[in-house]
Amino acid sequence: MSLRHAVLGLLAVEPATGYELAQRFDKSLAHAWHASHSQIYPELSRLDEEGMVEVVGEGPRRSRTWALTDRGRDELRRFMTETEPSRAQRNETALRWFLVSLLEPADRRTVLEREIAFVREELAQLTAIATTVDAMPGPPHPFRGTVDLGLRVDAVMLDWLGEQLKAAEKGTRRRPARRRSSR
């Protein structure tokens, strides 16, 4: 996923400062993409140089409010309609979940309990976001569907983690088959 296209997409919803964009990343795109302030500001400068965004307001401490230009909207449309996304993913959490069965039951329980606590916290945060968004006046927020997706994915992950924890509590573990030497 391209940071530039994520920024363009967020600005397509409404103009924002760099700080506000970082907040929106945390509240709406956290499942798909994380971007820090140190990544957002240079990207805004590049997009400005390419004519895809423009400053539409200035505030205290030299903060600038950015908006999408027609060129930026065209680029966002091109990205969404004419390019095939990279479906390859690097997900450390998924890797750890893939390998968790290799641990001894006590270690597996520790890891799974930590993961369950994280997913529960994330579900609580998404539920709070959904409540806030649903209370907003006007038409449904453009990212409400993504919040629903996050809630559904987290619910499935929580179920799976619970199943793995039950298996760990029973002390069951699938060990990889050991090769026998040919001696």
Image (cartoon, helix red, strand yellow):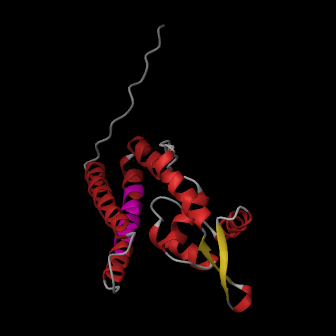
Residue 59 vertical position relative to residue 80 in the rendered view, above or below: below
The structure residue drawn at horizontal position 43% and vertical position 16%, both measured from the top left corner, is: 180
Rendered location of residue 164, percent (x, y):
30, 50
Decide whether residue 118 is among the magenta residues: yes
Image vertical order of residue 130 relative to residue 88, above or below = below
Give the image location of residue 121, x and y in percent.
Answer: 38, 71
The residue shown at (70%, 92%) is 60
Find the residue positioned furthest to the front: 70
In the image, 115 versus 180, the foreground residue is 115
Quarter residue 99 falls in: top left
Determine the image quadrant of residue 98.
top left
Q: Quarter of the image holding residue 161?
A: bottom left
Magenta stretch bounds: 111-124
Query: Can I make out residue 103 in this image?
Result: no
**Main secondary-structure element of the magenta-colored stretch:** helix
Counting labels gives 0
Residue 47 appears in the figure? yes
Q: Is residue 180 left or right of residue 25?
A: left
